[in-house]
Image: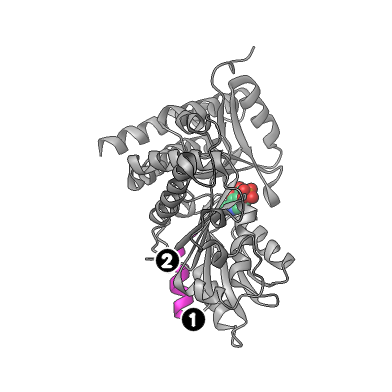
Amino acid sequence: MTLRSGRQFLSIPGPTTVPDEVLQAMHRPAVDIYGGDGGGELFGITTRCLSDLKEIFRTTGDTYIYVANGHGAWEGTLCNVLSAGDTVLVLESGRFAVGWGEQAHSMGIEIKSVPGDWQHAVDPTKVEEALRADTENKIKAVLVVQIDTASGCVNDIPAIRAAMDAAGHDALLMVDTIASLACMPFEMDAWGVDVAVGGSQKGLMTPPGLGFAAASPKAKERHQHAGLRTSYWDWTYRDQDEHYRKYCGTPPVHLLFALRKAMDMLLEEGLDNVHHRHALLAGATHAAINVWREGGTFDFNILDPKQRSQSVTTLRLADGFAPEPIRAYCQNTLGVTLGLGIGDLSGKAFRVAHMGHVNAPMMLGTLGALEITLDVLGMIDGTSKGGIKAATEFLATSLKA
Ligand SMILES: Cc1ncc(COP(=O)(O)O)c(C=O)c1O
């Protein structure tokens, strides 16, 4: 017996559910990319996407759209501001901070790390210490992920900026917002971020394939002397007026149709409302887990509630439990696909995403399917079965307030 027929729910932390309106926006022929009516339309879409990205990153700096996934955007930002032999300070909070650092290393950049245990956010005091110890000023950039999608933690970017300022260090602050943009507040200019990296496939509700970058004036200044610049990623090349250069080649026409629609939807909802929706759906998820965890079979991976992200929650299993039966039952019998544990959490954790195009019934459906799964697999009993009640009460109380 299965109950999975009907709409499948994707609760993996990216790619996320693409709204029907966004899918429909792509369902049209390609247009002339060089001009004429279609080309003219595309120029307009590019101009508006680049300026709306500024609004979403909250910056007056320059923005860029790459035909790339998140790894591409990582590389694209590193090579625009760094030279081989430079050192970057990697703030470890999960697989993605580490991965960005590994990529920098593969490009000839030296790595120093502030190590982390993947159960806590980055400690800003350790960042200050590491920068103070850099008396020869070798560190040219600090790499941090706002929400590390593997561990489920959220890092405090303003506190990290304050630590850099307290150390009097002039490294660039480079922030990966791939799993946080349009899920929680990000204030590039107000927080003193120099380079921000984003991707289309999570909070931005667009299929994978577009990477975003935003650069502060200080980053653009460093860019003038960066030795790793290559023509595809190059900001100066893309700053030219000609439309073709904005993508260093053929524009990703259909992904741009999708992105335009998705940004229209986000801006119509209002970014503050979008963030608040994510906060409430994360709160409902956390309320349910707080009850289920009493069964002793799993717990939040991130120990401090304030460090748990509002786009994805990682659940660490107790010894003797494996994620695969949970994911398999939830998917095959109930039609909800949960995320895998990745990196050091592979085989030890699973993830529930609450990001992007998601609303109360989708989230309650996901949590309901998970509660049934946990019950069937004997992982909750007695009072630890009351997760859904806690989630709905959390939402009702929040909405009344
Ligand atoms: C925070 C974060 N950074 C970077 C990436 C890498 O992005 P991609 O898989 O699109 O290359 C991901 C992917 O999930 C991510 O969550």
Mark number, residue 158: 2
Question: Can you give x and y, in whole percent of width and height, for residue 63 in the image?
Answer: 47, 59
Question: Can you give x and y, in whole percent of width and height, for residue 322 in the image?
Answer: 70, 37
In the image, which residues are magenta?
155-166
Amino acid at circle 1: Ala
- Extreme-front residue of the structure: 36
Compared with residue 57, is residue 182 higher up or lower down, i.e. above or below?
Answer: above
Q: Residues within 10 Å of mark 2 (few under 14, many from 20)?
A: some
- The residue shown at (45%, 34%) is 358
Mark number, residue 382: none
Q: Is residue 401 found inside the magenta-colored segment of the image?
A: no
Of 319 and 348, nearer the camera is 348
Left or right? Give the position of 328 relative to 6.
right
- The residue shown at (45%, 79%) is 166
Asked whether the viewer can see residue 134, the reply is yes
Mark number, residue 167: 1
Compared with residue 35, is residue 223 higher up or lower down, i.e. above or below?
Answer: below
Question: Can you give x and y, in whole percent of width and height, for residue 93 in the image?
Answer: 59, 59
Compared with residue 123, is residue 207 higher up or lower down, i.e. above or below?
Answer: above
Of 263 and 99, nearer the camera is 263
Q: Is residue 164 found inside the magenta-colored segment of the image?
A: yes
C-beta proximity under 8 Å, tags 2 and 1: no
Left or right? Give the position of 277 relative to 376.
left
